Image (spheres, grey):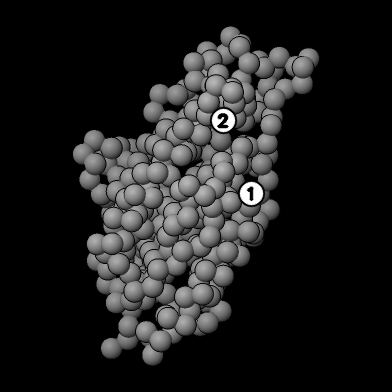
Amino acid sequence: MAVKIGLALGSGSARGWAHIGVIRSLQDEGIKIDLVCGTSIGAVVAGAYAADFLDPMDQWIRELTWADILGFMDVTLPRSGLIEGGKIINYFRENLSDSAIEDLSIPFAAVATDLKTGQEIWLQKGSLMDAIRASMSLPGILTPHQQNAQWLVDGGLVNPVPVSLCRAMGADVVIAVNLNSDIMGKRRFTRMPDQRPPENQPMEDLTLPRKLAAFFNGKLRKTNLSIFKRYGQLSQDRGPSLFEVIAMSINIMQDRITRQRLAGEPPEVLVSPRLNHIGLLEFNRAAEAIEEGRLAMNRMMPLLKDMLE
């Protein structure tokens, strides 16, 4: 009986492009992936692989710039999240794929969290893009995703590296990718490029993406902009910006939960790319992340081959 290989791709925002490098390494060695699951950005890459649009995604993300990233940020009133998330999902629907999960070429599942109960939700049927959108709803950043009577948020709150889901789907050998292994206490937060307006340009005249950049950097000046006024006026000398607080808090939480889950549910092969130099929203550094993912999988390849033999 053939051994089933499952790939469990973990959460980690922009660091998640490293998952593509892991898959490329396995493809280079001719190792067949029989099923794939993911949490948050891991669900994005897992879905792309299962729906056979990893190649166009790879090409697209390597060309991303800060302007592109900001352009996808559909800012909303800070009620349940800063960004609506519709722009990026609609882009995926129109340019990549929105198959039903049941129709994918290989089994796929994503992890989300029920905001009301805290329950871990496994998304294994229905719209692929809806599953991805729910799994990547980073609290405070992306608004929750409504599915029937549930409001779903990022699966990283409960299962950052979904080894348990991979086993439940029938994997005999689980290759797990942990993007959070070296993020605490080592990396310095990388700010987005300074997008402050020229001295003669009022903040009110800026586009929403540029307002958002200033907001994330904690560099908003006193204005009558009610949306941002209450949330963004932290300067460097007064402490971290709101976005830094959210980002680092999520890092702390996911680091602790990841350690606990992996201790209780160890995979056969644990891949840990070294990604502490890539910030939470630095999606424009895809080439670096992909290469590190490939290198990290290559380091574990002898172990995997011995296991399969």
Q: Residue at x 45, y 34 (%)?
A: 246
Tell me, for residue 161, which label it has, or none: none
Label 2: element kind: helix
Answer yes or no: is residue 226 visible: yes
Q: Residue at x 68, y 39 (%)?
A: 67
From the viewer's side, name the closer residue of 303 and 115: 303
Label 1: element kind: helix
Q: Position of residue 38 (x, y in %)?
A: 39, 58
Q: Which quadrant of the rendered structure holds the C terminus?
A: bottom left
From the viewer's side, name the closer residue of 256 and 126: 256
| Residue occupying the far top of the picture | 224
Q: Position of residue 90 (x, y in %)?
A: 51, 44
Q: Earlier in the sequence, mark 2 or mark 1?
A: 2
Tell me, for residue 216, which label it has, or none: 2
Q: Residues within 10 Å of mark 1 (few under 14, many from 20)?
A: many
From the viewer's side, name the closer residue of 68 and 203: 203
| 211 left or right of 98 in image | right
Q: Position of residue 266 (x, y in %)?
A: 30, 67
| 101 left or right of 197 in image | left
Mark 1, residue position:
284
| 120 left or right of 174 in image | left
Q: Residues within 10 Å of mark 2 (few under 14, many from 20)?
A: many
Q: Amino acid at mark 1?
A: Asn
Q: Are marks 2 and 1 in contact (CB under 8 Å)?
A: no
Q: Amino acid at mark 2?
A: Phe
Q: Is residue 59 above or below residue 194?
A: below
Q: Residue at x 29, y 55 (%)?
A: 260
Q: CA distance from mark 2 to mark 1?
A: 17 Å
Q: Residue at x 35, y 67 (%)?
A: 107
Q: Position of residue 182 (x, y in %)?
A: 47, 55
| 132 left or right of 163 in image | right
Answer yes or no: is residue 111 visible: no
